[in-house]
Amino acid sequence: MNLICLNHSGSPTKLLTDISSITLLVDKRGYADFVDYCKKNPLVREIVIHPHYRRATAIISFRDGSELNFTLLRHMVRKTINCLDIEDIRQNAFTNEFGMLVPAAEHHYEFMILNCQFSKYVLADRYRNYFAGFDFNTRATIFKYIQTRFNLIFNTLEDLYEPKPNMLLSIVIGLRADRKNSLLRMFLRSIEQLLFNIFGLITKRTIRIESKRRNSPEHSSSNQQRAAGQSLR
């Protein structure tokens, strides 16, 4: 389905036990395939989708009473700033030893640090330990990539693990240098986000889709499923 796991660290079993939501980078086709796969899976009871601007949260309820939360990310936008080079991530993604499609080490680190700095939370120990386990050449690649992309001045990767106002300012300045973050494009994104929020209030965003394996009819029409996908445009 070409779904890239952005917040991986180690084996899938560790991922499931240590975090509250699995973040997947998706395109329009991948989003539709993900929903369709869940609908047809005999273990799934219901899918609850909460669309947001350029992303969606999908809560998968299973027949045994357990749940899994997924964040389906089309673009990472913070304060109308486009934060990730999605095409670069897709081009350099690879399948790791656990059969997971994951981003290159520098893009994985970039995603985690951007989340940390913009959301103002300290990077979890599981990721600190994961990045600390990289060899010298991989850490050097990450270091060079972050410095070049954001024009940051720092001595070690660990310097970015805690949110700092001056660090966030430097990151924002670096992101603003990207052509995708011109004042015009940021203004257009702000209008787009405003219209999306207004549309969401009118249509009541939450969408429930029952598994096709159930005997009862599905709660969601095709129109509702298309509405859920609008958050990823």
Image (tube, grey):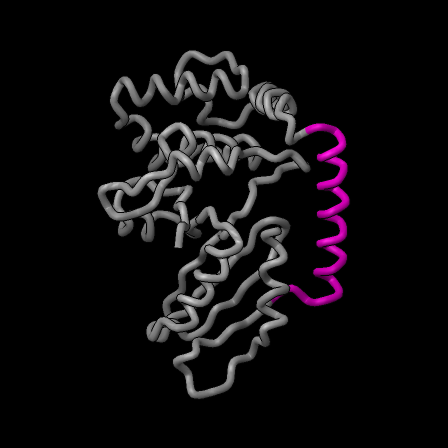
What secondary structure is the magenta-colored segment mainly? helix
Magenta segment: 182-206
Residue 70 is left or right of residue 138, and the answer is right
Q: Is residue 64 visible?
A: no
Question: Residue 111's x, y, as percent?
Answer: 47, 35
Point 57% across, 23% down: residue: 171
Point 43% across, 39% down: residue: 90
Q: Is residue 83 visible?
A: yes
Residue 140 is left or right of residue 74, and the answer is left
Q: Is residue 221 in the magenta section?
A: no
Point 47% across, 33% down: residue: 88
Give whichever of 34, 23 is nearer the camera: 34
Q: Is residue 184 in the magenta section?
A: yes
Question: Residue 18's x, y, as percent?
Answer: 34, 48
- State whether residue 55 is above or below residue 91: below
In which quadrant of the rendered image does the N terminus lie? Answer: bottom left
Dividing the picture into quadrants, the one containing residue 198 is bottom right
Give whichever of 108, 183 is nearer the camera: 183
Question: Residue 52's x, y, as percent?
Answer: 61, 53
